[in-house]
Amino acid sequence: MAQTIQPQKPDKNTDGSALAAKPRIRDAEWTLTRIWTRYRFAIVTVINLTIFFIIWQLLAKYEVIGPPIIFPSFTDTVSALKIGWFGGQVTDGTNFGLLRDFVIANNAWESLQRYTISMVIAIGLGIPIGLAMGGFKWVDAILSPYVWTLSSLPRLAIYAPLVLIMGIGESIKYALIILTAIFPVIINTWAGVKTTEQSLINAARVFGANRAQIYKKVVLPYTLPFVVSGIQLSLSRGLIGVVIVEFLTGASTLGGLGWLIFRSASAFNAPLTYAALMSLAVFALILVQGTRSLEAKIAPWRQVSKT
Amino acid sequence: MTPTGQGRKPLIVAENMTAGYELERERKLLTALEGVSLTVHDGEFLVLVGPSGCGKTTFINVIAGLVQPWSGSVTFNGKPIDGPGEDRSMVFQDYAIMPWRTVEQNIQLPFELRPHDLSKSDVADKVQAIIGDVGLTGFEKSFPYELSGGMRQRVGLARAMVTQPKVLLADEPFGAVDAMTREVLQAQLEALVMNAGQTVVFITHSIDEAIALGDRIAVISNRPGKVREIVTVDMDRPRLAEGEITTHPRYGELREHLWNLVKDEALGAKDAHHDDDISTGDSRLDRLATSPATTMDPGI
């Protein structure tokens, strides 16, 4: 990130006057040092993970932590992953009771649908609520006790009263996931509106902005990066919500990825538990990294001012 | 261009005006200006100098229509000022340009906010012309975070000048800019204003800047602020196109006179707690009280 602003540095002194015989931005040569500087993170990560999987395999092989039903080997986990996602034959004779063809894929699809719908609702409600709370004092005064209480309360505690009201069905799952995920969006959006720089608002007023224009041209763009980081937080909160809710409500079959993790563990199908867990981890990673680059794209000015 | 505002039509007239603001956390009302009477003439360059927290910013905010006076009257062209208007624009000390807009888009903002009957290409032409005037050519598509402080303030200046307003208000616009850039910007401002014949109300902490730019310099006293003295700068324009203004025969006398006025006020202001300018605390005040003959004030 530092490289992107460096070419601007000379402006401080010359203030933009053109004395450039050489172009100010040139291609750097590819030397070994540069390749290492650039890719060292990737290289180290590959080595790091390789060592991690080798140690895992050794720990399982010599049963350091426990027998295979408690701590599966890396290779068993990989074959569980393969069968769970793409189908195939169970070859090595371990007890794979729950493990059927495509079992992870089917449960993941179940969870993904639930997650996506809940997140769309949470974000779709959270942004307008946050904007209204930030923009109108009365809305803020009325809603803030509920928002702050619910957002600081461990969401699991709401489960019992929710069951009393909604029973155990599909709707309570959505309700709990939404309640887990919505508050970061609300609070971040609210904070963005509230912290909008007064001098920017003053400038807009001087140049003729009315209230609606101040909102549209200053407050909303200023708030956008806050909303994005709110969404980012909400997405990972929502993931927690999905796993918890699937564990709590249970199912006989196809309860989702969260259900599969707990269910396979209680059936002592450790390879499947680990395979489902790894699938979840990869999904979570992709999600978080994806939204991180989203923030950089939406608000480049914030990225630079952070460094 | 006559160096003084005398003989011109009064444009902005403040009469016995008192204004201030509320300190919300402490639930106190703070009087920034008390009983100020000051006339800005059509086409003159009026500079306000005075210690930190003496109410200069409040005065300029009242003219801009951002702040309502508590009592007394402020009129523009004979009519009481009621909110911002397109005849007055402003340059801010902290630039106040939108970080999510490119240079071009920032300068274009005034046209988006107020209705006008210019075509799209006319607006683009005006924006392009002012970009050339302030020396930002080649940076049209840059974002503010890619620019230095001096260039950001050029954007602020261009945005304020692009609609050719009757009055330009400037709240210590070059305070946060390094000394060299500051001189360049001063010269550019003088050229721009001489060209368009604007009326300017300009706040500064630097006596040198006040002499370099002002037709008249109003020295504001400690809070609550009053006009202590108005000094006329009888030096021909353009003053900055040639470079050295400090060698002008009148320069030394004016500087000494102003310095004595400001020094008293600045020393007396030590116990003023609140700063109504963008707060830099007392350090700026100390610097003012002890600054050597040539101020190299880098601001914040």
Image: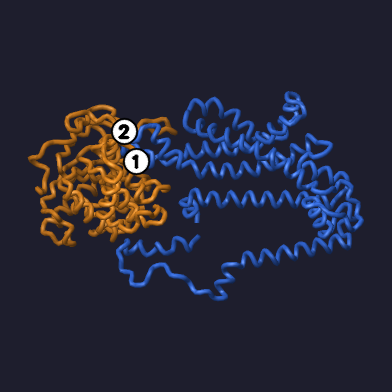
Chain colours: A blue, B orange
Residue B265, position as x, y percentages in the image: 25, 45
Where residue B14 appears, x then y in whole percent? 20, 33
A20 horizontally vs A121: left or right:
left
Say few, some or many: other residues with alpha carbon within 10 Å of mark 2 (under 14 / 14 to 19 / 20 or more). Answer: some
Of A304 and A80, nearer the camera is A80
- Please report, as a chain letter, where disc 1 is located: A
**Residue A154 location, x and y as percent?**
69, 36
**Residue positioned most to the bottom:** A31
Q: Is residue B265 left or right of residue A234?
A: left
In the picture, the disc for residue A203 is: 1
Q: Quadrant of residue B56?
A: top left
Residue drawn at x 76%, y 43% is: A107
Which of the chains bears the disc numbered 2? B
A73 sits to left or right of B7: right
Q: Taking the image as drawn, is residue B94 in sight?
A: no
Q: Amino acid at mark 1?
A: Ala
Residue at the (28%, 53%) spot, across then down = B131
The quadrant where residue A200 appears: top left
Percent position of residue B169, x then y: 25, 42
- How many tags in the picture? 2
| Residue B191's disc number | none
SS for callout 2: loop
Residue annotated with mark 2: B67
Quadrant in the rendering for residue B212: bottom left
Q: Residues within 10 Å of mark 1 (few under 14, many from 20)?
A: many
Q: CA distance from mark 2 to mark 1?
A: 13 Å
Q: Is residue B23 visible?
A: yes
- Foreground tag (2 vs 1): 1
